[in-house]
Amino acid sequence: VLVLRALKYNLKAATYLDTQSDKWNNYKTRFSELKHCDLLESLGSNGRGIKLDTLCSMVGLPGKYDVHGDEVMKLFYENELEKIHEYCESDVLNTYMLFLKYEFIKANVSEEDYIDFLSYMRDFLRVKKSDRSYTEVFAKACESEISKVRS
């Protein structure tokens, strides 16, 4: 999609299309994490097809706690758009927490920064998203993760 958009609008995409450097470490190389990271590919050993919910459950993150993907169509036809909205936001939070954890174990994020990112997320949720059904689930997950790192 990126290349097609670049072609359509005559946008320069030199970084994305870089084939002059190391052929195994550029943006288009599937297994390289130098310029991009497909989290599910990386954690699923490049093709095992592990679901986000499964990965989150395995590492102690909330995962799906209320709505599951197979319920979205039914919710849509019942005009439960707010529930779908919260479901999508909770997926983003799971992905973010999983990504942070992955970057932490790769030593790309220091212990101090990891705790700071989780603390910020917890505080943001409690202040800006206090009306969401997932707020306390994820805020407590942040606190739990911080406790694990500190102990």
Image (tube, grey):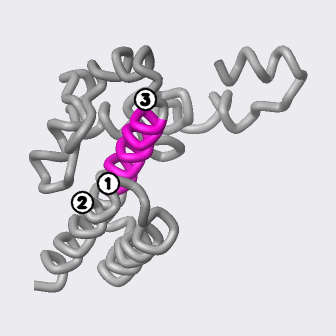
The amino acid type of the residue labelled 3 equals: Glu
- Point out the image quarter for the C terminus: bottom left
Q: Which residues are magenta?
A: 82-97
Name the mark nearer the viewer: 1 or 3.
3
Find numbered disc 3 in the image and state the secondary structure of the residue it sits on. loop
Where is mark 2, residue-wise? 137
The amino acid type of the residue labelled 2 equals: Val
Where is mark 3, residue-wise? 80
Instruction: Give the quadrant of residue 75.
Output: top left
Residue 107 position within the rendered picture, expressed as x and y whole percent measured from the top left: 31, 67
Q: Nearer the viewer, residue 105 or 123?
A: 123
Give left or right: position of 104 versus 65.
Answer: right
Give left or right: position of 68 versus 28.
Answer: left
Q: Nearer the viewer, residue 61 or 89?
A: 89
> Is residue 84 in the magenta section?
yes
Mark carried by residue 134: 1
Spatial CA span between label 1 and label 2? 5 Å
